[in-house]
Image (cartoon, rainbow, N blue to C red):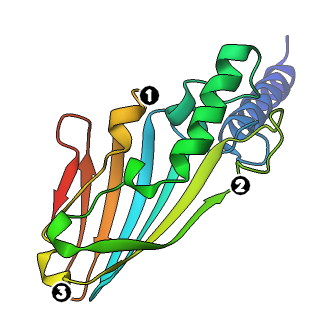
Amino acid sequence: MSNRTIRALSAARLAACALAALALVSPQLHAHGSHTHGHGSVRLSIDGGNVEASFDVPLESFLGYDYPPRNPAQAGKLAALRERLADPAGLIEAPAEARCSVVDNRVTPDLASAPDDADISNLIVVVRLRCEQPEALKAFTFSAFRDHPGLKQLRVQLQDSSKRKTVTVRPRFPAITL
């Protein structure tokens, strides 16, 4: 085999490897986008008595699977998740002394109207609270860990008027202090 042939084969192999690597990392080519099972992120913004928590979590972390339900047990898990997501206290809890009430709670895609056979990779849940006693906002508990054993950690980006910080919370220590 000549050097020219060897170089041509090497170049072809390198191109094939590059295409394979691109297929693995490109969200457009990956069936479920880019996410890591068990891990989610939260943006927590506090502005006086207004609090917004925006969750981005793989559906698998909530259900234990990330494809359309294949049996009655999985369909039951999806139905239970739909009900739990209607109550934001199932995801995040402010201190009772802050006297917070929910002013908005949105889930994208909307699981209430999504067909059972929809292929959903990540859920975006936005919870907005209005707190009567904002000075009592000393910590938040991420109650999502209680009902979702597949959720292993949340990377929380906190922003309020005086600071910004990023903290990883886990089931064993599910709270962030301000």
Q: Which residue is mark 3?
A: 162
Q: Residue flagged by tag 2: what amino acid is it?
A: Pro
Q: Which image quadrant is residue 148 in?
A: top left
Residue 133 place in picture, x, y as percent = 19, 83
Q: How far, Cα to Cα, is label 1 from label 2?
A: 20 Å
Q: Secondary structure at mark 2?
A: loop
Residue 128 place in picture, x, y as percent = 45, 73
User: 10 Å neighbourhood of mark 3: few (<14), some, or many (≥20)?
Assistant: few
Q: Residue flagged by tag 3: what amino acid is it?
A: Ser
User: 10 Å neighbourhood of mark 2: few (<14), some, or many (≥20)?
Assistant: some
Mark linked to residue 150: 1
Q: Nearer the viewer, residue 160 or 166?
A: 160
Residue 153 place in picture, x, y as percent = 34, 40
Quarter of the figure that contains the C terminus: bottom left
Q: Nearer the viewer, residue 95 or 165?
A: 95
User: 10 Å neighbourhood of mark 1: few (<14), some, or many (≥20)?
Assistant: some
Report the residue at 52% width, 65% height from top.
126
Q: Earlier in the sequence, mark 2 or mark 3?
A: 2
Left or right: residue 85 compared with residue 89: right
Q: Which image quadrant is residue 83 in?
A: top right
Q: Residue flagged by tag 1: what amino acid is it?
A: Gly
Report the residue at 35% width, 47% height from top.
154
Left or right: residue 135 compared with residue 131: left
Q: Secondary structure at mark 3?
A: loop
Q: Which residue is mark 2?
A: 109
Q: Earlier in the sequence, mark 1 or mark 3?
A: 1
Q: How far, Cα to Cα, is label 1 from label 3?
A: 34 Å
Quarter of the figure that contains the N terminus: top right
